[in-house]
Amino acid sequence: MRFESERFLAGSEVAVEELGEGIKRQILGHNDEIMIVKVWFESGSEGYQHKHRHSQSTYIESGVFDVTIGSETRRQGAGDSYYIPPHELHGAVCVEAGVLIDVFSPVREDFLVPGEAS
C-alpha cells in the first residue's frame, strides 16, 4: 500500500485525533519513507513504554517530559530532542503540558489505518 500526504498542509485544516488519557495527535506530511506527527500531552499524561520497527527522532516544542529510552531516563524540555533506534523500548511522562514533534522512518502505517494505531 502506498502512503502519501498532500504536498502542502495547513495545520488548521488537518484533523487532530483524541487518543485519550490527555494525548492528541495530528498526522502531518508523510510518504512511505518518512512521517511527521505533532502530539499534545496534558500534564501527567504518559506515552507508555513500547517499541516499533521505525527510527524515531523527536523535538520537544514545549513542556517538560521524563523520557525513557532503553534503561535511561532524562528530563527534557522545550528545544531538546532525542533519537530512538528501531526496536528500542521507550516512553515519556509529561511533567508540564507540552507538544512533541515526532519524525518516523519509514511511515507509521498503523497511524494511517483506523483501529491499528498504538
Image: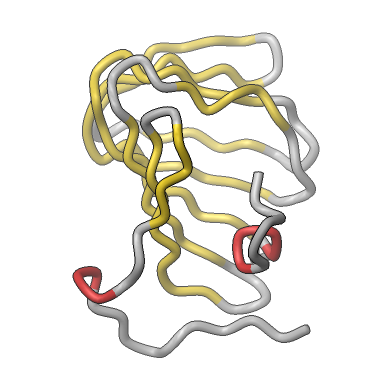
Looking at the rendering, which quadrant does residue 70 occupy?
A: top right
Quadrant housing residue 37: bottom left
Above or below, 67 against 53 in this view is above
Across and down, in percent, residue 22 comes to: 37, 30
92 on left or right of 50: left
Q: Residue at (64%, 25%) from the top-left corner? A: 90
Which residue sits at x=22%, y=34%? Answer: 62
* Residue 14, image x, y percentages: 32, 72
What colour scheme does the image use?
secondary structure
Q: Residue visible at 48% across and 22% down?
A: 46
Pinpoint residue 31: horizontal percent, then vertical percent. 59, 78
Determine the residue positioned at 75% across, 43% down: 52
State which quarter of the image contains the N terminus: bottom right
Q: Quadrant of the C terminus?
A: top right
User: Total label count?
Assistant: 0
Q: Tell whether 29 sits left or right of 83.
A: left
As drawn, which residue projects farthest toward the bottom?
A: 7
User: Quick check: 29 above or below 70?
Assistant: below
On the image, the x and y values in percent for residue 57 come to 52, 45
- Direction from residue 33 to residue 102 in the image, left or right: left
User: Eyeballing the image, is 6 above or below 62?
Assistant: below
Q: For residue 88, which quarter of the picture?
A: top right
